[in-house]
Amino acid sequence: MMYPSRRKPVLYFKEERRFLSPRCSIYKLFIVCTVLLLVSLLWLQLSCSGDMTSSAEDRPQLRPQQRPPPCQAEAQASAADDPSWGPHKLAVIVPFRERFEELLVFVPFMHGFLSKKKIRHKILVINQVDRYRFNRASLINVGHLESGNDTDYLAMHDVDLLPLNDALDYGFPEEGPFHVASPELHPLYHYKTYVGGILLLTKKHYDMCNGMSNRFWGWGREDDEFYRRLKKAQLQLFRPSGITTGYKTFLHIHDPAWRKRDQKRVAAQKQEQFKVDPEGGLSNLRYEVESRQEVVIGGAPCTVINTRLGCDQNQTPWCLLG
């Protein structure tokens, strides 16, 4: 009888150690972990709240002028709705062939210059892609016809001439053609009848002149002939006044040592280059638009019109060089 009484407590004691002790240890471990987790979360919340408060106090406030600039589309949309930009829109016509280095500078520069002056504009690069010699006048004629109904005046603009003076006027030339690159300001050409480089005209005035003569293949002389057209149309020519920067008013980025101009003159061309073309111009222009591309250069939009000119070799055999 004594044995069972001793044995039973022993057996009971051993069973309790096997069963209750692990449960107790797991329960205690769970409680400790829960407490540690709550303490960690509380500490993390307090520290984050402190950091956020201090950083909010130390961080400078974002002022209106520190906001990032709007995207191009938003900027153009806001300009279109802003009456301070005026009702007129300028077509910047750039006769062009294979002068890409200059074009990469010209497009963003002129877009920024005109936008700063609040001149509504679009830049049209008339790219000659045919086999004939370069014809600046014909390309300007193409630009006039392809400029669209959303523009009402144009700038005959060389790709290598950049305006440096903000006082230069690119506004609507209502009274008559406005020669921006006047002889008193142009870095190279200073004779009184010079009207090249940059010339602004309304589309109406350009039509009155029948555009420019298409007979001038190669470099030069088409501006001098156009000066006679302005006189014949009885259009008064205006030029800038009050500009004090002289020959430093423009930056001429053409390098004649690196890129030679096509100044060759064949016998017949030498005789014809000083004559007035009484009938030629917009009325007998021959061209074909091969393609039209919308391009963005340095964040500035422009339209490249790849153009093939036509040449009547019976009339102007010097459009090709043998």
Image (tube, grey):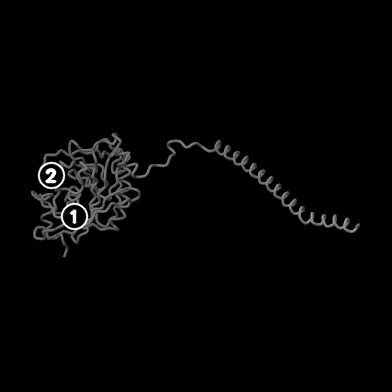
- Residue at the image position 17 percent from the left and 44 percent from the top: 193
Quadrant containing the C terminus in the rendered view = bottom left
Q: Amino acid at mark 1?
A: Asn
Q: Is residue 124 shown left or right of residue 225?
A: right
Rendered location of residue 156, percent (x, y): 22, 46
The mark found on residue 135 in the picture is 1
- Residue at the image position 18 percent from the left and 47 percent from the top: 144
The residue closer to the viewer here, 57 or 275, is: 57
Rendered location of residue 49, percent (x, y): 59, 39
Rendered location of residue 204, percent (x, y): 15, 41
Q: Is residue 269 visible?
A: yes
Rendered location of residue 282, percent (x, y): 13, 49
Q: Amino acid at mark 2?
A: Cys
The residue closer to the viewer here, 75 or 23, is: 23
Disc 2 crowd, CA 10 A, few/some/many (<14, 14-19, 20+): many
- Count the numbered circles shown: 2
Q: What SS does tag 1 mark?
A: loop
Disc 1 crowd, CA 10 A, few/some/many (<14, 14-19, 20+): many
| Residue sitting at the far top | 84
Quadrant containing the N terminus in the rendered view = bottom right
- Residue at the image position 28 percent from the left and 48 percent from the top: 161
The residue closer to the viewer here, 7 or 149, is: 7
| Residue sitting at the far right | 2
Task: Give the labeled residue for mark 2.
Answer: 209
